[in-house]
Image (spheres, grey):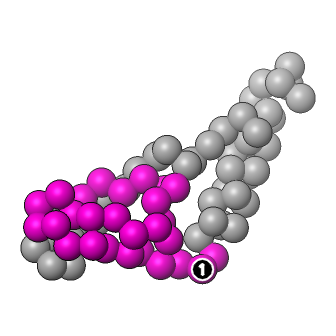
Amino acid sequence: MGFSLRNMHFKINCPNCNSEIKVKVKDVNVPFVCESCGKTIHLQDKNFSQNVREAEKLISKFEKSFNPSRH
């Protein structure tokens, strides 16, 4: 697969101290620690990995439509 969302990130606020935290897509469903307050945070979404794979497929298909030589 050409395109990967796994290392992209999004921002959330820590539910304990409200500090802004960058979370990598690959870290959803994996506990991590807030660097500001030290609290363990666990973002859970049972369908997240499947949705990411589907989005990657759609993006890859979209990319190929603009660059036929990548088929």
Residue 61 belongs to the span the image colors magenta: no
Q: Residue 47: x and y, percent?
A: 63, 76
Q: Is residue 26 visible?
A: yes
Identify the residue at horizontal 78%, vertical 24% (top origin). Answer: 67
Extreme residue in the right direction? 71
Locate the N terminus and report the quarter of the image it occupies.
top right
Queried whether the magenta region covers residue 43, the answer comes back as yes
Asked if 70 appears above or below 62 in the picture, the reply is above
**From the viewer's perspective, is 71 left or right of 55?**
right
**Depth order, front residue of 50/31:** 31
What residue is at 75 percent from the left and 50 percent from the top? Answer: 57
Please give left or right for residue 38 compared with residue 59 in the image. Answer: left
Position of the C terminus by quadrant:
top right
Give the percent coordinates (x, y) of residue 6.
Answer: 55, 49
Whether residue 3 sits left or right of residue 1 in the image: it is left
Q: In this view, does 25 lie above or below 47?
A: above
Kindly identify the amino acid type of the residue bearing the numbered disc 1. Lys
Magenta residues span: 20-47
Residue 43 horizontal/vertical position (percent): 41, 74
Q: Mark 1 points at which residue?
A: 46
Q: In this view, does 10 lie above or below 4?
A: below
Please count the marks in the image.
Answer: 1
Classify 62 as above or below 40: above
